[in-house]
Amino acid sequence: MILLSSIVFIIIIIVSVYMRSPQFGAVPKELRLERIKRSPYYRQGAFSNMSPTPNFTNGYSVWKVLFRALTGKFPNKVPSGAIDSVITDLKKLSPDQNVLVWFGHSSYLLQISGKKFLIDPVLSGHASPIANLVKAFDGSNVYRAEDFPEIDYLILTHDHFDHVDYKTLVELREKVNSVICSLGVGAHLERWKYKPESIIEKEWNEKEDLGDGLTLHCEPARHFSGRTFKRNNTLWSSFLLQTPDMNIFLGGDSGYDSHYKIIGQKYHQIDLAILELGQYDEAWAYIHHHPQEVLQAALDLKAKRIIPVHNSKFALANHAWDEPLSKITALNQGNAISILTPRIGEVVYLHDMSQQFDPWWEGIDSSYN
């Protein structure tokens, strides 16, 4: 018993020391914490969703999920062939073009009215505080911080490791003019030496006038947050970018809920919705969309076109790596929603309604892994 207690004590010390390393960020405190406490979405020491959102779907528990992950067999979680990516010179994008470039998972660059927005960049090759634990698929991690031009606005939807990547954000720091993030996330950035005056934190139903006819609205999502064992001490959000001639919805991570219909009614029409699709499971059905829910969310938003993201780079769930895109494509047969499925790095021209994309995932070897 003395030996066992000693081993447990040593493990606790090692974990405690490791979790003080910079990639875990910082806990909101002082003026930031006071602002958080005034938020109507912060109750009993944590942020909460609009609707009750259990950690797991009824019938599941953390132990059941862990046991299934350790003992189950899940074919094709990782492609055996390389992801078909495109190398675009981001520094040579014509400033008069309105374009989007996706980098896999939930990372993408938007250039609108000459302004550059970078959303949730993860370029380190993994989505975990432990390097190489959740590795990017072969061929999916082909962009580096040095490939990017100066960024006008870095937008961070929430602080999970697959959206807020310490290594990437440190390497991009000198290229970023301003950061707009969910309430509380700025604490991480300040620890990582971002200038406090460059950080703009928002909570749901707030907006930021960016000038030149651009406004960024912070809107609800149904998810959770946290980089340590403490959950929900920072907010998670979606965003709506209003431009002189477009409404673009930046979905962030979310499960399906009534907020989509509320947002659709608020803005009347959304020209492009970038919606999370991937890393879903019946065990956590409240916090990630299944394919049919993405289509319903698009209808609720009154979206003309959608880009499904949160796929094709990391295996964070048990479904086949190509299932999200193949399923939503099949479900949408004959429907009026236009689904854009660019390759990683492929330029999407936002005003070109005729641009077509191949089902590129069908050409990649998906043999058993």
Image (cartoon, helix red, strand yellow):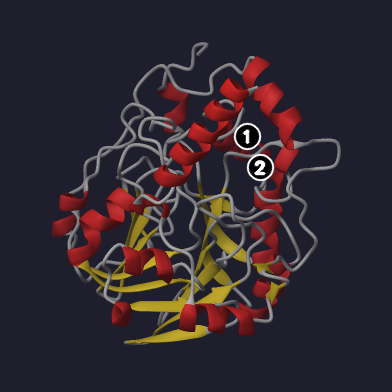
- Up/down of 203 relative to 339, above or below: below
Q: Position of residue 334 (x, y in %)?
A: 67, 44
Q: Which residue is located at x 20 percent, y 69 percent?
A: 95
| Above or below: residue 234 compared with residue 357 | below
Horizontal side of 238 relative to 176 (left or right) equals right
**Total residue callouts:** 2
Classify mark 2: helix, strand or loop: helix
Q: Position of residue 76 (x, y in %)?
A: 54, 19
Which amino acid type corresponds to the residue marked 2 in the rendered image?
Answer: Pro
Number of other residues with Cα within 10 Å of mark 2, as a class: few under 14, some 14 to 19, many 20 or more:
many
Left or right, residue 15 beside residue 223:
left
Labels 1 and 2: the sequence-earlier one: 2
Pick whichever, 286 or 366, lies toward us. 286
Residue placed under numbered mark 1 in the picture: 327
Q: Identity of the amino acid at label 1? A: Lys
- Residue 209 image offset from top left, x and y in percent: 41, 87
Residue depicted at x 64% and y 54%: 336
The answer to which quarter of the image holds residue 111 is bottom left
- Residue 352 rendering spot, x and y as whole percentages: 38, 60
- Which label belongs to residue 293? none
Whether the residues at callouts 1 and 2 have beta carbons within 8 Å, the answer is yes
In this figure, which residue is indicated by the disc labeled 2?
291
Q: Secondary structure at mark 1?
A: helix
Distance of label 1 from label 2 (alpha carbons): 6 Å
Point out the image quarter for the N terminus. top right
Of residues 296 and 335, the one drawn nearer to the viewer in this rendering = 296
